[in-house]
């Protein structure tokens, strides 16, 4: 037996001998661009798990199985460097420090892509590495906590608006922020926000529809850009660039809950790339997420708004339900997203086909006003059985939101010209349902409708209703041509756009007479399909007078089939201070075409308030909507006084004329002796008030943006970084409200509606992030200051309230268990900070009789409290 064991050992030795003889040892050092040795750099043999780390003197030794081979040198804060090794001679590897914020080329649509340092306009650059440091899941959350100029908050108790997060730049509202995906215009959302919350009357972009796992980086252009992109780019541009040919497949799962035990979240995503031998690729992303509802309702324990005398058991019911049955918080939402992004290069290498296809489905459920038993009876026994105690009912609003964007194009060189031809299709829809409600009018027999007649539409579900839908789509064609000369760069382009807005009626029971309780459906007289088209031409020139001094100019002509033509222009200049920074300035004009949704939405809200469209506006002598126009002045500087330190400051002034606003509710005037046109309309439509869109205001916004960064600080075995961002923003209404002559007896914008323009967004917002990373461990501490906001009472200034500024602290921890697996722990709002509570000052309507503890009209940062999330990330 002993002889057999010796024989086996000899055989194993003879088998391994060639491998030992072939094995080679590679030695070398790693240094930075200044020749300084760098410790703790990872040295990996590509395609294997074989690796080592440089010592304190930057030296390394790595045994490889065969030559030639390729090794990779990389570490946090440095750009990966691949080196082919053909012999055992000592190798010296030079690696660059990562500085994407300055060296990444940005600026889709300009005459020449430029870095942040070279750009004549201020740009925030947020790369995918910043996403995990933010501790946020959705794109809206990410941008809110990474860009001081960007604001987005989830609304509550705002009907359909509850299912869309309202976002803006520089406090100018969602309508004046243009969103691009891969440099192409993204479609608007289908709805107009008509509730009395932030963003009232606005139409924006559905920012929740793009998963962060599909995004490579984001450019935030904080400057007017209508001279390049046309309508909507008054406040700035968000350009979302999707991932391309990634080196790894990445999968992640996450889960979380609030410290109050609600708002449970769970989700996951996967991103990777398919490649072919011709150099083409398709990057793919699949994402699923579930968000549970939260409840932060007040507990008044008494009823101050509704009459309780008709219900004998009211006092006992209120005692048993001190929150009056309310659920106030974020909605329940289930989301699924799929995105593909790819290219296929030409065989001659002079062009490529490209495309991206993506979108998602978001199903949401939110809660309306709880119907206490003393508020609305249940005589037809929909929610209780005869003989049982009746406890009221809770209507629920559910939505299915679809968002889709498809881009297909070709880029190629024609001589010295670079040509980009593309087509884009975008679509957003919201299908609305109401559950756990009923329409009492369908249980009686009116003269023109009998639900008991088999020839009449029947009530198929007495407590569930299909309430209608809104659809918006656009088709866009673009041709862009660029050419670079010795000192000049030019870009010219053309765009054709067709937009369609469609309103689909709900089933008859959802809107008959006053409709379902607390949310009536879209009636047949409100359904419509409206189209418009537009054509645009632009030209952009950059000219380098010297190597440091740049001047630029751009102009764009747009013609819309409904509002006519507009010409916007922009001039800018930049002077570089060597490699230490630059000073810059720009002046431009802009415009925004009123959305089809603003022109044509016609809806009766809660059976009492009618939103009239353009045809009805004409009957009241209200002029057709015109384009908003703007001017934008920006003066700033960016400095890089020392290695890894950057500072930028920009001062801006933006004027917006003929700003489109949704009016306050107008009812009967004080003249009882004569019936005016408004009162005639109220009588014919059987409503108590009307609303309408009109070019009501001129505004002036002034502000300052400040950013400071100190990154790539070598500390022990890791890298330390600090980032500061501050936005100060002040918007004022200039002149008087522009009231149509036919409505001179009315105040078309009350104090609250004007308040949403000038005081509802924080005047100061600040971000301070501290991040430390080692090979296996990272920790980030983010502090976000949301400054004070003020709510103004519609008529009585004594009942105004200012809600104080607050600081939200987020902690993000990550640990790499293996090279292919990382664990993450996130504590958002770690100090459990809430906004100030509502002080009604005697006006119970502001808090809905105490049902609201925190103001839904003004939402600085929401009211979730502490939220704890954890998850795993896998890379393979």
Image (cartoon, rainbow, N blue to C red):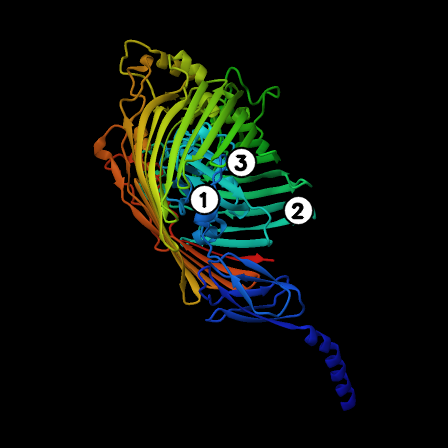
Horizontal and vertical percent position of residue 201: 40, 28
CA distance separating discs 3 and 2: 36 Å
Name the residue at 43% across, 22% down.
567
Q: How crowded is mark 1: few (under 14 residues within 10 Å), some or many (20 or more)?
A: some
Whether 305 is drawn above or below 514: the answer is: below
Q: Disc 3 designates what residue?
A: 401
Whether 469 is drawn above or below 296: the answer is: above
The quadrant of the picture occupied by the C terminus is bottom right
316 left or right, relative to 530: left
If you read the primary sequence from the N terminus, does the residue marked by circle 1 or circle 2 appear first? 1
**Quadrant hosting residue 598:** top left
If you read the primary sequence from the N terminus, does the residue marked by circle 1 or circle 3 appear first? 1
In the depicted view, which residue is nearer to us: 315 or 117?
A: 117
Q: How crowded is mark 3: few (under 14 residues within 10 Å), some or many (20 or more)?
A: many
CA distance separating discs 1 and 3: 37 Å
If you read the primary sequence from the N terminus, does the residue marked by circle 3 or circle 2 appear first? 2
Q: Disc 2 designates what residue?
A: 279
388 left or right, relative to 151: right
Of tags 3 and 2, which is closer to the observer?
2
In the depicted view, which residue is nearer to us: 521 or 14?
A: 14
Name the residue at 48% across, 20% down.
559
Q: Disc 1 designates what residue?
A: 115
In the depicted view, which residue is nearer to us: 588 or 149?
A: 588
Name the residue at 58% across, 64% down.
44
Horizontal and vertical percent position of residue 630: 37, 26
């Amino acid at each position: 037996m002993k002889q057999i064991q010796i024989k086996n050992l000899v055989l194993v030795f003879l088998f391994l001998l060639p491998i030992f003889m072939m094995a080679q040892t590679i030695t070398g050092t790693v240094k930075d661009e200044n020749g300084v040795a760098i410790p703790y750099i990872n040295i990996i043999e590509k395609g294997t798990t074989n690796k080592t780390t440089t010592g304190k003197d930057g030296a390394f030794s790595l045994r490889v199985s065969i030559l030639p081979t390729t090794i990779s040198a990389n570490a946090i804060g440095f750009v990966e460097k691949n080196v082919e090794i053909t012999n055992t001679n000592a190798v010296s590897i030079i690696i660059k420090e990562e500085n994407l914020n300055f060296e990444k080329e940005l600026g889709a649509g300009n005459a020449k892509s430029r870095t942040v340092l070279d750009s004549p306009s201020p740009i925030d650059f947020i790369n995918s590495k910043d996403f995990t440091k933010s501790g946020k899941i959705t794109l809206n959350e990410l941008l809110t906590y990474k860009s001081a100029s960007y604001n987005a908050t989830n609304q509550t108790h705002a009907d359909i608006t509850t299912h869309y997060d309202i976002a803006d730049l520089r406090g100018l509202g969602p309508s004046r922020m243009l969103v691009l995906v891969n440099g192409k215009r993204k479609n608007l959302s289908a709805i107009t926000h008509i509730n009395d919350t932030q963003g009232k009357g606005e139409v924006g972009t559905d920012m929740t529809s793009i998963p962060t796992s599909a995004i490579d980086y984001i450019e935030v252009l904080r400057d007017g850009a209508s001279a390049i992109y046309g309508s909507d780019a008054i406040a700035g541009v968000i350009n979302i660039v999707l991932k391309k040919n990634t080196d790894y497949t990445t999968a992640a799962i996450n889960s979380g809950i609030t410290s109050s035990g609600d708002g449970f979240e769970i989700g996951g995503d996967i991103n990777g790339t398919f490649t072919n031998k011709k150099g083409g690729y398709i990057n793919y992303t699949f994402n699923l997420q579930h968000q549970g509802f939260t409840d932060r309702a007040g507990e008044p324990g008494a009823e101050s708004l509704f009459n309780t005398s008709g219900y004998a058991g009211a006092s006992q019911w209120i005692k048993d339900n001190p929150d009056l049955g309310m659920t106030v918080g974020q909605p329940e939402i289930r989301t699924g997203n799929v995105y593909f992004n790819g290219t296929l290069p030409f065989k001659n290498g002079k062009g490529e086909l490209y495309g991206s296809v993506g979108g998602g489905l978001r199903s949401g459920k939110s809660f309306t006003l709880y119907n206490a038993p003393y508020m609305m009876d249940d005589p037809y026994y929909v929610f209780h059985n005869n003989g049982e105690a009746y406890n009221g009912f809770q209507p629920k609003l559910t939505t299915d939101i679809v968002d889709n964007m498809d881009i297909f194009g070709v880029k190629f060189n024609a001589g010295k010209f670079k040509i980009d031809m593309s087509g884009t299709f975008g679509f957003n829809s919201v299908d609305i349902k109401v559950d756990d409600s009923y329409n009492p009018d369908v249980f009686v027999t009116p003269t023109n409708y009998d639900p008991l007649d088999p020839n009449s539409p029947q009530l198929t579900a007495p407590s569930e209703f299909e309430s209608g839908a809104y659809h918006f789509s656009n088709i866009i064609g673009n041709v862009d041509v660029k050419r670079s000369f010795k000192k000049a760069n030019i870009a010219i382009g053309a765009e054709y756009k067709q937009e369609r807005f469609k309103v689909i009626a709900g089933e008859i029971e959802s809107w008959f007479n006053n409709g379902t309780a607390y949310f009536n459906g879209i009636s047949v007289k409100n359904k419509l399909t409206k189209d418009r088209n537009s054509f645009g031409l632009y030209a952009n020139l950059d000219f380098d007078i010297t190597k440091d001094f740049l001047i630029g100019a751009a102009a764009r002509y747009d013609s819309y089939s409904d509002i006519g033509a507009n010409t916007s222009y922009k001039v800018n200049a930049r002077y570089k201070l060597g490699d230490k920074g630059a000073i810059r300035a720009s002046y431009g004009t802009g415009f925004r075409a009123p959305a089809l949704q603003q022109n044509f939405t016609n809806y009766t809200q809660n059976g009492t308030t009618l939103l009239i469209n353009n045809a009805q506006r004409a009957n009241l002598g209200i002029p057709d909507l015109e384009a908003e126009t703007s001017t934008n002045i920006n003066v700033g500087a960016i400095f890089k006084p020392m290695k890894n330190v950057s500072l930028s400051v920009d001062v801006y002034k933006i004027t917006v004329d003929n700003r489109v606003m949704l009016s306050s509710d107008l009812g009967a005037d004080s003249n009882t002796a004569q019936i005016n046109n408004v009162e005639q309309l109220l009588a014919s439509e059987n409503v108590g008030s009307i609303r309408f869109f009109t070019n009501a205001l001129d505004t002036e916004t002034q502000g300052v943006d400040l950013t400071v960064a100190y990154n790539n600080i070598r500390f022990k075995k890791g890298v330390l970084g600090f980032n500061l961002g501050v936005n100060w923003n002040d918007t004022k209404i200039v002149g008087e409200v522009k009231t149509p002559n036919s409505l001179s007896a009315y105040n078309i914008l009350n104090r609250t509606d004007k308040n949403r323009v000038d005081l509802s967004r924080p005047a100061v917002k600040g971000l301070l992030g501290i991040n430390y990373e080692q090979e296996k461990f990272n920790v980030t501490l983010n502090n976000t200051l949301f400054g004070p906001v003020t709510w103004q009472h519609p008529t009585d200034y004594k009942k105004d309230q200012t809600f104080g500024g607050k600081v939200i602290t987020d902690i993000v921890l990550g640990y790499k268990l293996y090279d292919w697996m990382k664990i993450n722990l996130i504590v958002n709002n770690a100090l459990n900070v809430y906004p100030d509570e509502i002080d009604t000052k005697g006006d119970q309507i502001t808090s809905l009789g105490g049902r609201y503890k925190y103001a839904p009209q003004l939402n600085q940062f929401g009211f979730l409290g502490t939220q704890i999330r954890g998850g795993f990330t896998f890379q393979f």
